[in-house]
Image (spheres, helix red, strand yellow):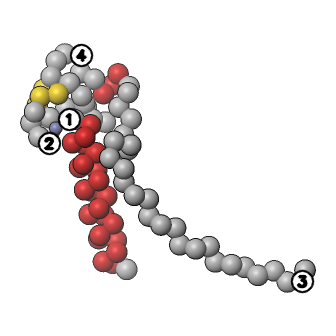
Amino acid sequence: MTGRQRRRAPPKAEPEYVPGSLLNWNGSEHWDYGGPQPCRYCEVPTQLRDSHGSHAHKTCAEDALAQQAADAAEAYHQDG
Ligand SMILES: [Zn+2]
């Protein structure tokens, strides 16, 4: 065995967003014990709160995050 070849690592595939797997809202900070308030995204009342303390459904927040990530990825690829 002589010489060592450096091999370039194959490009990693971008992780695919799987709905429902992104956010962990099990903590009590994500539950409003005071009662439901309109979701910031769809305005349907919910007792769930996002990481900013705003009322939001988990699925709505994940959809919004997925959209943000898609927008960011698109902008990134346009720059390249
Ligand atoms: Zn909602």
Q: Earlier in the sequence, mark 4 or mark 3?
A: 3
Spatial CA span between label 1 and label 2 = 7 Å
* 1 and 2 marks in contact (CB < 8 Å): yes
Asked if the beta carbon under badge 1 is closer than 8 A to the nearest atom of ligand 1, the reply is yes
Q: Which mark is residue 44?
A: none
- State the image coordinates of residue 52 (x, y, percent, origin top left): 27, 36
Amino acid of disc 4: Tyr
Question: Comparing marks 4 and 3, which lies closer to the viewer?
Answer: 3
Which residue corresponds to mark 4?
33
Amino acid of disc 1: Ala
Q: Is residue 5 above or below residue 38?
A: below
Q: Is residue 11 left or right of residue 6?
A: left
Q: Is residue 18 left or right of residue 60?
A: right
Which residue corresponds to mark 1?
56
Which residue corresponds to mark 3?
2
Judge whether residue 54 can be spotted in this image: no
Judge whether residue 5 can be spotted in this image: yes
Q: Is residue 46 above or below residue 8?
A: above
Q: Which mark is residue 41?
A: 2
Spatial CA span between label 4 and label 1 = 14 Å
Q: Quadrant of residue 8?
A: bottom right
* 3 and 1 marks in contact (CB < 8 Å): no
Q: Is residue 48 above or below residue 15?
A: above
